[in-house]
Image (tube, helix red, strand yellow):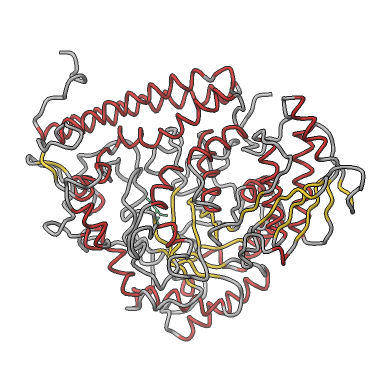
Amino acid sequence: RADDGYRLWLKYDLVADAGQRAQYRAAAQFISSNGADAVLKTAASELQRGLQGLLGQPVPLVAKGESTKRGILLAIDPSANVLGNPASKEGYRISTQGRNLVVTGGSGAGVLYGVYALLRQVQTGQSLSNLNVSSSPRIQYRLLNHWDNPNGTVERGYAGSSIWKWYELPQLLDPRYTDYARANASIGINGVAINNVNASARYLTAEYIQKVKALAGVMRPYGIRVYLSVFWAAPKVIGGLKTSDPLDAQVKQWWTAKAEEVYKEIPDFGGFLVKANSEGEPGPQDYGRTHADGANMLAAALGQHDGIVMWRAFVYKAGSGDRFKQAYEDFKPLDGTFAPKVLVQVKNGPIDFQAREPFHPLFGAMPKTPLVLEVQITQEYLGFASHLVYLAPMFKECLDADTQTKGPGSTVAKVVDGSLDQHRISGIAGVANIGSDRNWTGHPMGQANWYAFGRLAWDYNLTSKAIATEWTKMSLTREPQAVATIVDVMNKSRDIYVRYTTPLGLHHIMGQNIHYGPEPWLADAGRPDWTAVYYHKADAAGLGFDRTAAGSNALSLYSPGVQKQWGDAKTCPLNYLLWFHHVSWMQPLPTGRTLWNELATRYYTGADSVTWMQQRWASVKPQVDPALHADVTARLEIQRREALWWRDACVLYFQSFSKQPIPAPFTPPT
Ligand code: GCW
């Protein structure tokens, strides 16, 4: 039957190679698991389910290992000290003991993650003999953030509507919720903030707490905790108070009582995510208080419960200078004043999920505060669900970036996992690309971005290529040549997208509001920092935003080492050039071309590369499910058309300033 993409990377189709299948069958004649832990039970049933499909025969679940057969033993072993790190309760070890394979974890969740790792071995065709692997997550809170609204719409969602059916909850539990939980658990995600950060107060009403409780009940057996985005003014809007001032006694009391109410229904509730004083949302600054006043009040309201507050740093206001600097200016002075349960959530870059941004200057600048890295899986600025853009290279570009705040090697990843500054808690969040479409993500290849986020949240040292390879083998094909071709296309796709949309460090030149397509000429959007011209600053002299000391001096927010490299237009990596420099059109670049020629070259070669992607994709047709292949083929055709749209719009617009011809060999025929 045609693959509708619903099963994601959890397909568990019969292993095609009979010899290999026989080996797996021999190693997995029974599963043995003891204990009442709910997540351990999930581990056993997931293993059974996966093996049944892959091996084409049922594998019995027995209470004790059968001495003459080879099987898989599952056990929680809190003392296992899985990775030399006793705190890492979610870690697992798969070891070969005698004739059996043993999967241990520091908790039920650890075993569950071990089971998925074991299944992955089989799904990707690896051997099970003498298997000895262990792994534990580098980052503790690994969350999806849903920007889903109570009315079923999804902000920046391109895959249908919300998967949460609020009108049916709590009585009716769509089986899809369980499938969603499985998919997340299989990649190590352990938390979901289920509603939009532009939050409705409704989620905190008694009626909605019952609905959230029902969802939490579905997630729990998969080791996933539920979090809520909160509307700052909830005490006024649903609590009947006159104020939402965080220092007001009644307000504090309201939140404390609300937290109690939530924990009474959802004992493992994860905590609160907050967008405050940003893009028109209310917040503590409305009362002359700081973000720390707000966050700490919420942390206090959580009391002794095991929950956290993730307070977003995505703040900027019209007329406050270079938007690049604003979050830093608001939050850096607050370092050291946040309560222990508070994490500050920072987007990967300083503006807003552009196709390429330098790392956010807050990373490394707030050593006393655990910082959550927020990346966007949904492709708001990356072609929605129409363009094939594999995001692991983008996530990794940020994680691998060296803040140099404590000398070389002070990567964003080490800030985020807490190791650089010895934090007790750490977190990472991905804005979900999931919706009600049968295939979850609209673009079938968008599933790879969900997958890659989870895998990198677990271990940011995995390479983009390794993740793409795993995903392709589990989702599309295991034929080696086709895998190599698809992985190659995926790995190059983000750079290609950058080339035909925003090369050389251009940013925020997309269509207004909808954030789609090119609109570099946008000069009036109600406020300058929502236009395009504010960011590219094209004029007769050149192009780019001068953020050196001669300009906005945003560069000064970075450590001296970074400033040194990026501050000089001659040493600044070309990928970030126009983020920091206004460069004259005729300036020669290290590529040997002038800025103008380089810009045009990138637009043209970027658009041409989409044709290359189409050709590569066409070549794997025999190896990929026909319906899925046709779907991606059609989307690539959209992508090609729109790459030309971007190219022509931008080259012609910028040419009106540069007054230079389009360089050979791209000169259009006259
Ligand atoms: O990326 C921008 C989006 C808004 C979003 C905001 C945010 C949820 O355009 O839709 O609002 O950022 O991250 O808060």
Q: Which residue ends up furthest to the top in the rendered image?
A: 670
Residue 534 or 87: which is nearer the viewer?
Answer: 87
- Where is residue 142, by image quadrant? bottom right
Q: Residue at x 70, y 53 (%)?
A: 112
What is the x, y in percent for residue 660? 10, 29
Instruction: Say whether residue 419 is left or right of residue 662.
Output: right
What is the x, y in percent for residue 450? 53, 44
Q: Residue at x 46, y 45 (%)?
A: 378
Is 401 rendered above or below residue 387?
below
Q: Which residue ends up furthest to the bottom in the rendered image?
A: 249
Q: Residue at x 76, y 26 (%)?
A: 19
Residue 447 or 262: which is nearer the viewer?
Answer: 447
Please state, as top left, top right, bottom left or bottom right, where the C terminus lies in the image: top left
- Where is residue 75, by image quadrant? bottom right
Please state, as top left, top right, bottom left or bottom right, where the N terminus lies in the image: top right
Residue 286 or 426: which is nearer the viewer?
Answer: 426
What is the x, y in percent for residue 152? 54, 49
What is the x, y in percent for residue 610? 37, 25
Residue 427 or 177: which is nearer the viewer?
Answer: 427
Is 598 rendered above or below residue 33?
above
> What is the number of callouts on the image?
0
Q: Residue at x 69, y 54 (%)?
A: 93
- Where is residue 263, by image quadrant? bottom right
Instruction: Say whether residue 216 is left or right of residue 331.
Output: right
